[in-house]
Image: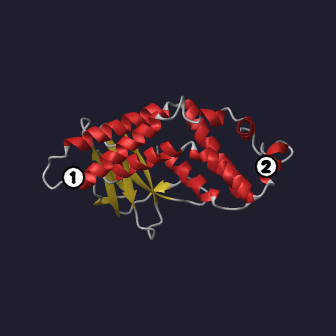
Amino acid sequence: MLRLEHLFGLVNHHLEQSDVWSSRATINGLLDMVSIFAKAEIKADLIKELDRHREKLAKIRLSPGVDTHRLDQVLDELGQATSRLYGITGQIAQELRSNEFLKNILQRNSIPGGSCAFDLPLYHYWLEQHHEDRQEELSSWLKTLDPVQDAVILILSLIRGSTRPTKELASNGFFQRSLDPQTPAQLIQVGLSKDIRLFAEISGGKHRFTIRFMEPLEVERPTQTQEDIPFSLNTCIL
């Protein structure tokens, strides 16, 4: 879902741009999603996750302090997202996979520089059309994936909003925390001030996760900092 969120963000950004390179970027993002849908049963996974969230949220309805009006809105959104996914006939993006124009670009994209004008003259011709024409066709292809985008955004927003961040400290750039195997974490978010010129590497499993704050180096491999690093941590459990 995080990869799909990334790709939807990419194509939505470039779709609005009028230049040829943005149209190429939109096509590449779309084809990356088509490849993902071909390798995994995303529809069943999304429906299963939506059902899990609906069951989980329905159980807290009678808990003290629950905003039942907002809860009903979220439950309704989950139900609508599920219905829209059931409305997709067959496998997600099947229509796009059978599109000869897109199929040819996908095949050539596996070759470095394989989508050059001399390799794909039809693609070159399409890119030379007016921006409005390209945008209309791109929008029609992306519209077939709207139910997926809506489901991904809804699920990830619920997961991210399930808990509040805590302030933590990584001693010598290292932090580790145990997890309850009976209550698995769906997502771990690490927040770091932009003034701190480090990045986080996160690894983990069912029982624990580890965060290392790394110093980027120009030529050599990044190394773990030896400084104590304050950061925010959101262990999302829903």
Q: Which residue is mark 2?
A: 126
Q: Residue at x 47, y 46 (%)?
A: 2
Q: Secondary structure at mark 1?
A: helix
Report whether residue 236 is seen.
no
Report if residue 225 is visible in the image.
Answer: yes
| Quarter of the figure with residue 130 | bottom right
Q: Check residue 68 in the rendering and tell me which mark sits there, or answer none.
A: 1
Which residue of the protein is positioned furthest toward the right in this rendering?
118
Residue 167: which quarter of the image? Answer: bottom left
**Residue 208, x across and y down, in percent:** 31, 42
Viewer-side residue, 126 vs 201: 126
* Front position among marks 2 and 1: 1
Residue type pointed to by label 2? Trp
Secondary structure under badge 2? helix
Q: How many marks?
A: 2
The residue carrying pointer 1 sits among few (fewer than 14), some (14 to 19) or many (20 or more) residues within 10 Å by Cα, namely some
